[in-house]
Image: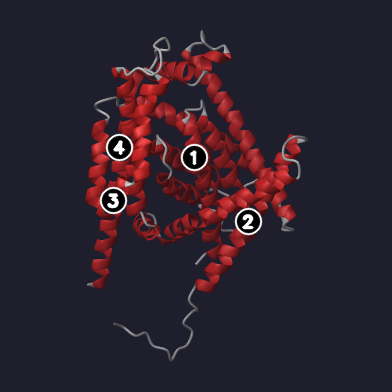
Amino acid sequence: MVFGATNTKTTRTTARIGGVLIIGAGCMTAVLTLTWPLVLMPTGAAIAAIYVFYRRQTSALLNKWLWLGLTLAVVLPVWIVGPPGDLETPRGGTTLPALFTGLTAAARVLTTVSVMLLIGGCLSPAGVSRALAHICGKDIALACAIGVNLLPAVLEMLRRTALAMRLRGGFRRNRIANLKRLLVAVGVQTVRLTEDVAEALLLAEPPPNDDPDRTETTP
Amino acid sequence: MQARWIAVVAVFGAVWGATEMSLGALLRNMAIPMHGSLMAGIGIVIMLVARRTLTTEDRYGRGVCLAIGVVAAAMLPMSVSRGIGPAIAGILFEAACLEIVLWPARAGAWRYVCSGALAGLSPLLQMLAMLLVQYGAAAVSTFRDVFLNKQGGARLGLAEATAGTVLTLVAVFSLIYGMVCGLLGWSLARRILKRLGRPHA
């Protein structure tokens, strides 16, 4: 009974993640290809999706810095850049094409932020790993969850290696040799990180139940 | 539990995922010509290094490339860039190409080079497949137009070239690029193992 309930929950999580990803990808593709006023459709769809899937994040759309950015996205093409493709018209004048360009840019920014909030709000590492375990198997799901959590460590490792290279003179001289050294250093650190993760996994593994007197307790 | 197998898949998958989310997203958003091939080369090197480091120690090398591709593809939706769907399909296809060649037996340098060549061709094959779905019989001529006008091929002096010539040139370039990446993966893994003081064939 409990197993059935967990399975249903996993299926629901998988469906939810799939739905969010499809909506996000669809909104981003549409907003980058459509122009004014059709561009408002994916924007509205992204905001509606946030309201439906992750209502708490809706308040993030009222952030004053976001609206300052959106205002700048509208104002800059109108007052500074001018109408698109027309370099003859003097700046500072309000023209309808320039206004539409600005509104399209603002809609694109708003959609991008909405999709980021939607994906960030709905896709927790635990949810993703549950869905992957459902689809591909537990080993790969575990690897995915570990990989997502390792991203900051990997980025820090790349940053430190690049800094070390820069302190040794960077790529100004012997570029090929220095690139080889950089790649080998990154590879060595990655393999060492692999060993640390493997050790941690072995420590986390439960010991084999070799005690014959010990009995399993069933709920 | 194959702890080391999982660790290698997780770490190398995270490295490739991080590269796709940062450099790959930047290249996709800027619509840099042949960005698919460039990222495929990076992926080939990462997967082959992972495969070789694991093969020499644990004999659990099989399936590593495909699993690393799955991990990297699973991270891609977190990147905000356009064209994530084709990129995910490309990563999985490339990983499958490497795995197909490396699966049968213990892999030597020549097999790494062959797998790199096949995986290097994968962005071209994927693009042709997508064009075939969209345009049917006109896929090759559309590929010529896309390559010349959108990917800067006209600037390389190929403006008058026929569709067949363009396709052959791109295929040969992808093949050679993939082979070089395969060889780079093999030699890089050898250097890494040497630095770590491990046995390397």
Q: Residue at x 38, y 19 (%)?
A: A92
Question: Which of labels 2 and 3 is toward the front?
Answer: 3
Relative image position of residue B87 (x, y in whole percent) = 43, 37
Residues indicated by labels 4 and 2 sit on the same polypeptide chain: yes
Residue that numbered label 3 is attached to: A59
Residue A5 sits in quarter = bottom left
Q: Earlier in the sequence, mark 2 or mark 3?
A: 3
Relative image position of residue B59 (x, y in whole percent) = 59, 58
Name which residue type carries label 3: Ser
Q: Earlier in the sequence, mark 4 or mark 2?
A: 4
Q: Residue at x 45, y 43 (%)?
A: B92
Residue that numbered label 1 is attached to: B94
Q: Residue at x 55, y 33 (%)?
A: B38
Relative image position of residue A91 (x, y in whole percent) = 40, 17
Q: Residue at x 46, y 33 (%)?
A: B28
- Per the model, the C-alpha gap separating discs 1 and 3 is 41 Å
Chain identity of mark 2: A
Name which residue type carries label 1: Glu
